[in-house]
Image: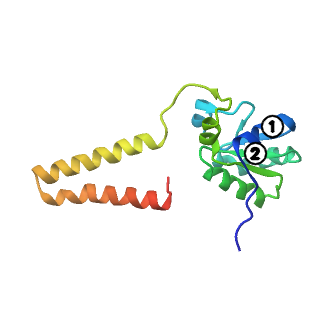
Amino acid sequence: MTALLSPLLDPRATAEMVRSAPGTRLLDVRTPGEFETAHIPGAYNVPLDTLSEHAREIRSVADAPIVLVCQSGSRARQADGTLRSLGMSNLHLLDGGMMAWQAAGLTVNRGAKRMSLERPVRITAGAIAAVGAILALLVNPLFAFIPAAIGSGLVFAGVNDRR
């Protein structure tokens, strides 16, 4: 049995829903740093990992439509499952998340630009792989296992969409 997924709304349909149904809530489940960098005007930030803690507040406005927003759509799907398990049903998902919203040229409130959480991870993994390769060339070929392990881990994470 597959889990029931809330209706997907493209960015323009979401903007129209917000315009035509003023009670519509935009619930952004990204991290506070991501939200501060760019968010849809009028959106509320409740990070995915704190969603259950705020269930009572969210349920109090659940009579109006709630559109779940994240960066690309995957965290919004997780939030959808969490909120549905808590008995909420008037939920929608912004298809493609903030990336799609911005690509559609819709209004965004921008704050200070921050480094994404993935960037330092990529820098560290790349540095370890490079040092391992240099050590394999200059010191001992067995150091080649370092970049091989890092590369394998990155491939596994990419295939399994792990963050």
How far from the left and from the top, in percent, is residue 8?
72, 52
In the image, residue 132 sits, relative to residue 39, either above or below, namely below
How far from the left and from the top, in percent, is residue 109?
66, 27
Q: Residue furthest bottom?
A: 1
Under circle 1, the secondary element is helix
Q: Earlier in the sequence, mark 1 or mark 2?
A: 1
In the image, residue 1 sits, relative to residue 84, either above or below, namely below
In the image, residue 140 sits, relative to residue 39, either above or below, namely below
Name the residue: 61% across, 31% down. Answer: 38
| Mark 1 or mark 2, whichever is nearer to me | 1
Left or right: 8 with respect to 60?
Answer: left
Instruction: Count the marks.
Output: 2
How far from the left and from the top, in percent, is residue 5?
73, 60
Name the residue: 33% across, 56% down. Answer: 151
Under circle 2, the secondary element is strand
> Is 40 in front, or is 163?
40
10 Å crowding of disc 2: few (<14), some (14-19), many (20+): many
10 Å crowding of disc 1: few (<14), some (14-19), many (20+): some
Three-letter amino acid code at disc 2? Val
Q: Quadrant of residue 155?
A: bottom left
Left or right: 108 with respect to 112?
Answer: right
Label 1, label 2: how far apart the Cα atoms are? 9 Å
Disc on res. 7: none
Disc on res. 67: 2
Name the residue: 45% across, 57% down. Answer: 158
> Do residues under tags 1 and 2 come within 8 Å of each other at their CB atoms?
yes
Tell me which colouring the rendered structure shows: rainbow
**Looking at the rendering, in which quadrant would you find the N terminus?**
bottom right
Three-letter amino acid code at disc 1? Val
Which residue is under mark 1?
Answer: 18
